[in-house]
């Protein structure tokens, strides 16, 4: 088998995992191939060159190339080099918490932070009709909500995975705890 022309044979579980991750990616607003490339790298747990990813997934090389760039922009994959092979190989973390924290951090920077900035600008704008107190109040409430959620997200990202898992498992017990504090 030529080192530069090889496709990995995926077992049915790998195929199902990768196809489903691609479908879920589409629902989360991520290109299907981007999600499939990431799923493949996560599933196999070893560095892969772009040509092997292309052949394994059966998608266009240009699509894989664009997907790899997108995943690098999201800090979800890294380039590694293999002794004796001049090609770039790509890998991702096998730690689900590292991946989760990376996605949350990136989405916060791309979505929450700009929204908070726009809401602040709206409140400070001379074009805001000061007579429309209801609109002004709605913007303040949206800003307050976004700021609290953003701060909470920052705090959660600083927690160790074991602590974060405990917080997540608390679920509705938090409501009971808060009821006791009244």
Image (cartoon, rainbow, N blue to C red):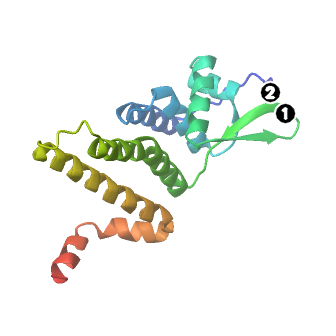
Q: Position of residue 24 (x, y in %)?
A: 38, 36
53 left or right of 128? right
CB contact under 8 Å: marks 2 and 1: yes
Residue receiving disc 1: 85
Q: Which numbered marker is on residue 38?
A: none
Which residue is situated farthest in the front direction here?
A: 126
Mark 1, residues whose alpha carbon is within 10 Å: few (<14), some, or many (≥20)? few
Which quadrant is home to the N terminus?
top right
Q: Nearer the viewer, residue 16 or 70?
A: 70
**Residue 128 in the image: above or below residue 161:** above
Mark 2, residues whose alpha carbon is within 10 Å: few (<14), some, or many (≥20)? few
The structure residue drawn at horizontal position 27% and vertical position 56%, both measured from the top left corner, is: 144
Q: Position of residue 167 (x, y in %)?
A: 36, 69
Q: Position of residue 6 (x, y in %)?
A: 72, 25
The structure residue drawn at horizontal position 33% and vertical position 47%, both measured from the top left corner, is: 120
Q: Is residue 62 visible?
A: yes
**Picture quadrant where residue 76 is located:** top right
Q: Nearer the viewer, residue 140 or 50?
A: 140
Q: Nearer the viewer, residue 79 or 116?
A: 116
**Picture quadrant where residue 78 is located:** top right
Q: Earlier in the sequence, mark 2 or mark 1?
A: 2
Q: Nearer the viewer, mark 2 or mark 1?
A: 1
The structure residue drawn at horizontal position 35% and vertical position 65%, both measured from the top left corner, is: 168
Q: Position of residue 133 (x, y in %)?
A: 12, 47
Q: Which numbered marker is on residue 3?
A: 2
Helix, strand or loop under label 2? loop
- Work out how far the residue at label 2 is from the one at label 1, CA to CA, in angstroms: 9 Å
Which quadrant is home to the C terminus?
bottom left
149 left or right of 104? left
């Amino acid at each position: 088998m030529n080192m530069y022309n090889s496709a990995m044979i995926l077992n049915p579980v790998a195929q199902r995992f990768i196809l489903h991750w691609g479908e879920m990616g589409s629902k989360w607003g991520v290109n299907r191939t981007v999600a499939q490339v990431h799923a493949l790298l996560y599933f196999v747990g070893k560095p892969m060159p772009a040509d092997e990813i292309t052949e394994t997934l059966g998608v266009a090389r240009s699509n894989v190339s664009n997907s790899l760039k997108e995943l690098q922009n999201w800090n979800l994959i890294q380039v590694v080099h293999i002794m004796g092979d001049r090609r770039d190989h790509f890998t991702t973390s096998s730690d689900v918490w590292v991946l989760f924290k990376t996605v949350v951090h990136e989405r916060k920077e791309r979505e929450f932070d700009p929204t908070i900035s726009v809401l602040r600008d709206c409140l400070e704008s001379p074009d805001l009709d000061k007579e429309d107190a209801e609109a002004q109040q709605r913007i303040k409430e949206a800003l307050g909500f976004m700021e609290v959620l953003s701060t909470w997200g920052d705090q959660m990202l600083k927690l160790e995975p074991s602590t974060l898992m405990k917080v997540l498992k608390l679920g509705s017990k938090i409501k009971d705890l808060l009821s006791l504090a009244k």
